[in-house]
Amino acid sequence: MACLRLKEWKLYKLESAFGQRYCQEKGIKSQKEFAWLTALVNDDFALPALVLGYSLQKFSCQKNMIAFVSEDVTSQTREALRKVGWEVQQHERLDCDWLQRKLGKKETHEGYIGTHTRFHAWGFTQFSKIVYLDPDYMPMTNIDELFDVDSEFAASVCSRPGVLDPCFNAGMLVFRPENRSKKEIMDLWFGTGKYHCANDQVLLWHYYADKGLYTALPYAYNVRRIIYRPMKAFHFACCVPPKPWSATCRPSRNEAKAFDKPITEVDHMAILFWKNLYEVLEKYDLEKWWKESWFSRQKQEYGNRTYKRCWEDSLYYYRDENL
């Protein structure tokens, strides 16, 4: 196992450094009919969207990167996204509040804000294949093979092999855009919305899986909450580890820069996230934007307390507060 971890880490470093050289030497050109897609409806997920864009720029030979944003995403964040390579497009925010307004109901603030916004993409028929990635999805290698998946719709299974959980996680989706499908998905949403606002993951499951059109992809493409191998990407979903950009603890710049060892603990993914983020700030001249944003914590960035010590201190504090 130790050898596998080391091999994986060496591959990650090699692809990070030479991924684009490989594309050039192999003559792999970006295909105009393929597109990466993400979506954010406010500035809360700006940092992971930057890291996602940076990761795709390092690993992928496919350069069409589209970021859906709502009107609540600030102009400063939009410019930061553009610097990393995203084509920023404004679209109406879609979620349960939006649906309830359309149905003449009182907003109940169900579900996640803006989670249905990705439905706009089904109308982007200029592309033959779209790979949607949540902003908090972090590729660990080149995953361009997803564009070659021969399926109307594909996503990673919910749970790792050996765990029975018949569903998929919508943080990574591979699909063929089609206007008819977009209309039918929206109709399904409106139909169920008369009784309950289903989240986008449930709607897509019923639309595709119920028809036998869902292709299950390996858990490796959407690893969450645990360290699992092979790991082609890690998704900061839910609670383990806490989403790095909103968590109490973060590594200093020196600690993150010095991190250079195989991933053995789930908390290592948070340190790797910050290593990437700090590189983004330097590479794309975003230091001014960063310091003026509410994300920045200068004392932690340039302090001496390690990420592990901060985490341990936080646990002790939480324990004492709940005695």
Image (tube, grey):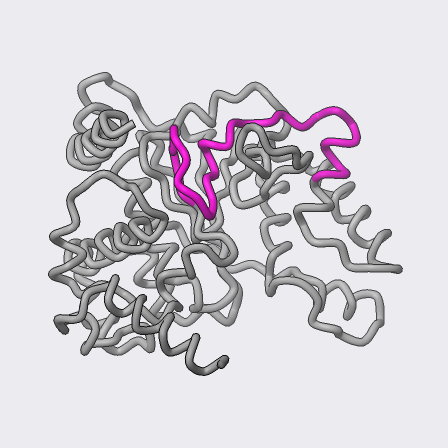
| Residue in the picture at 42% in, 61% down | 242
Given residues 213 and 83, the one toward you in this image is 213
Total label count? Answer: 0
The quarter of the picture where residue 62 lies is: top left
Asked whether residue 128 appears in the rendered view, the answer is: no
Residue visible at 16% across and 50% down?
A: 259
When the figure is inspected, residue 12 is found, relative to residue 77, above or below; the finding is above
> In the rendered view, would you say 220 is above or below 317?
above
Q: In the figure, residue 248 lies in which quadrant?
A: bottom left
Task: Tell me: 261 left or right of 170.
Answer: left
Q: Quarter of the image holding residue 257?
A: bottom left
Horizontal and vertical percent position of residue 76: 33, 70
Left or right for 315, reference 68: left
| Viewer can see residue 155 | yes
**Where is residue 95 shown, x and y percent of the image?**
67, 61
Verify whether residue 281 appears in magenta. no
Judge whether residue 230 is colored magenta: yes
Residue 104 vs residue 96, the one in the foreground = 96
Q: Is residue 318 above or below residue 265?
A: below
| Left or right: 184 in relation to 140 | right
Residue 133 locus on image (x, y percent): 48, 44
Q: What residue is rendered at 37% in x and 56% in y?
A: 48
Magenta segment boundaries in residue numbering: 205-234
Nearest the eye: 200 or 3: 3
Tell me the residue at 70%/54% (across/down): 199
The relative height of residue 164 versus residue 41 in the rendered view (above or below) is: above
Classify the position of the N terminus by image quarter. Answer: top left
